[in-house]
Image (cartoon, helix red, strand yellow):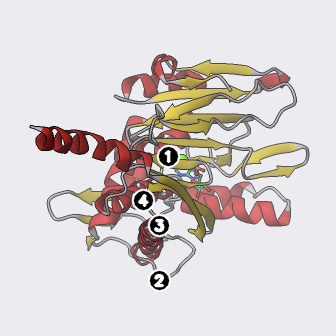
Amino acid sequence: MKIPALLLLWVLVLPLRAAEELRKFAFEKAEMGLPFRVSVYAADEAAARAGADAAFARIAELNAVMSDYDSDSELSRLSRTTGGAVPVSTALWKVLAHAQTVAERSGGAFDITVGPLVNVWRRARRTQTLPDAALLAEMRARVGYKKLRLDPEHRTAELLAPEMRLDLGAIAKGFACDEALAVLKQRGLPRALVGGSGDMAAGDAPPDQPGWRIEVAPLDAPDAPPPQIVYLKNCGIATSGDVFQRVEIAGQRYSHIVDPRTGLGLTDHSLVTIIAPDGMTADALSTAVSVLGPELGLKLVEETPGTAAHLVRKPAGKIQFLESARWRDVPRATR
Ligand code: AMP
Ligand code: MG
């Protein structure tokens, strides 16, 4: 009698002890031109490090597919084609297909064909001069999500206008976080958080915690409300806005996010944070909502299952603070 009872006790206690023995490890590495961080609970450092290395390797692999800076990337090679169906890899297909869905649903506010205009704004930032109207008009002729045709049956992409340029800057980081998290999970490390600047994907919660404790990025204004702290697990979170990258010309701030409908950098001083079932959805939506503005943006979020939005804006010098209905259900920490 005695031995089985002891055995039972041991079997019951073992999982508890295993959970207790998990320790948190964090690693950082520059990937996609940004600092990426992997936080993971593991039994020992070797397991954590091996997992993080594999996660970073996956991000590097995806960068080689989706970078618009690397002229050899699969994306850059696709961008150099015009009028011909090009077969694309599984990873690129997933991102292109998701991007086109968000483009459609946002009425073209989110648009990965925006590359030629993004280039113009990058140059404007370097030279501190506004692009002239003729150049903007020329670039706009190369932009428009309907000029990217996807064939789901054959998994091909076709660029319908000459000199187009695809830019996955608003969606690839979120996807990379999801993929890195999946790598950690496959290695038996599901309690993990992966994040680039502004984009994160959370796996299972840390032991004894309701989720990963994450501070929602605050607006860089002295009168902005204190940042909220949320607990997240098994979802993605992304923040977009002119706080991270912008250009100031003749006293006007322009964001690195372009409104494809006008060809201009956004001038709205805002920060949009989205929580979604995965990092890619959060990343794309945060950019889409930034372009759409609060009214249409929140409508898009309410219509997208499992997503929640938090917006801080400063129109006409006064702080405005908006949340979607589902944001109220996000677990919060009281500092
Ligand atoms: P994010 O920081 O996720 O909002 O992404 C911003 C980046 O996405 C920019 O640096 C551009 O590379 C790209 N981008 C700019 N405007 C748009 C847009 N309207 N739709 C999709 N991508 C965009
Ligand atoms: Mg984004």
Does mark 4's beta carbon lie closer than 8 Å to ligand 2?
A: no
Check disc 1 and give the amino acid type: Asp
Secondary structure category for the residue under label 1: helix
Compare residues 199 and 142 and report the one nearer the observer: 199
- Which quadrant is the N terminus positioned in? top left
The tag earlier along the polypeptide, 3 or 4, is: 4
Q: Please say if the residues under marks 1 and 3 sit with CB atoms less than 8 Å apart.
A: no
Q: Residues within 10 Å of mark 1 (few under 14, many from 20)?
A: many
The tag earlier along the polypeptide, 1 or 4, is: 4
Residue 151 is left or right of residue 145, and the answer is left
Does mark 1's beta carbon lie closer than 8 Å to ligand 2?
A: yes
Q: CA distance from mark 2 to mark 4?
A: 39 Å
Check disc 4 and give the amino acid type: Ala
The tag earlier along the polypeptide, 2 or 4, is: 4
Q: CA distance from mark 3 to mark 2?
A: 26 Å
Residue on which the image places disc 4: 43
Residue on which the image places disc 2: 72
